[in-house]
Image: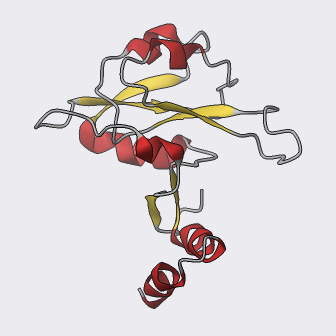
């Protein structure tokens, strides 16, 4: 992730079809995956009670399962800490709600949930939503 790029939520990701997290207040803690140590073994996915952990394809589009990793949807995480307990590689850490976003920016190598504005603009164009693409270009 480029430090100077503006990151936005990917509205086209299948995770956006899941129900919104319930509750009035955000959790005190949020989980962040340190992707440099993640093997993509998927153990953490099974233990997540709100289905907030998503697979991220590896960098080679011809072999997406090679070097796959996971990322946690910060909008859905409830801070239960199951993933930190389940992870055999200890690559998931809990952060205070306000610190989690900075940690995410530092530790995320590949994301499909949160993307750059330029990437979203390209997705809008690919999907024929020129109006959204033009609005993003004007910002």
Horizontal and vertical percent position of residue 74: 37, 40
Dividing the image into 4 quarters, which one contains the N terminus? Answer: bottom right
| Left or right: 66 in relation to 95 | right
Hey, which residue is sitting farthest bottom in the picture?
138
Residue 116 in which image quadrant: bottom right
Horizontal and vertical percent position of residue 16: 43, 47
Horizontal and vertical percent position of residue 121: 56, 75
* Residue in view at x 12 percent, y 37 percent: 25
24, above or below 126, in the image: above
* Residue in view at x 66 percent, y 72 percent: 126
| Left or right: 134 in relation to 96 | right
135, above or below 8, in the image: below
Q: Looking at the image, how many numbered discs can be counted on the residues?
A: 0
Horizontal and vertical percent position of residue 52: 43, 30
Q: Nearer the viewer, residue 138 or 35?
A: 138
* Residue in view at x 29 percent, y 40 percent: 20
92, above or below 25, in the image: above
User: How are the colours assigned in the image?
Assistant: secondary structure
Hey, which residue is sitting farthest right in the picture?
62
* Residue in view at x 61 percent, y 77 percent: 125
């Amino acid at each position: 992730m480029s430090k100077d790029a503006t990151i936005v939520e990917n509205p086209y990701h299948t995770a956006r079809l899941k129900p919104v997290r319930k509750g009035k207040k955000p959790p005190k803690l949020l989980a962040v995956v340190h992707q440099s140590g993640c093997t993509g073994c998927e153990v953490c996915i099974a233990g997540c009670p709100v289905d907030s952990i998503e697979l991220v394809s590896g960098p080679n589009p011809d072999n997406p399962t090679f070097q796959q990793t996971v990322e946690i949807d910060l909008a859905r995480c409830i801070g239960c800490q199951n993933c930190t307990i389940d992870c055999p590689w200890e690559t998931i850490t809990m952060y205070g709600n306000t610190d989690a976003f900075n940690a995410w920016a530092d530790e995320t190598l590949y994301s499909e949930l949160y993307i750059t504005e330029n990437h979203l603009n390209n997705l809008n164009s690919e999907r024929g939503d020129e109006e959204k693409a033009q609005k993003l270009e004007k910002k």
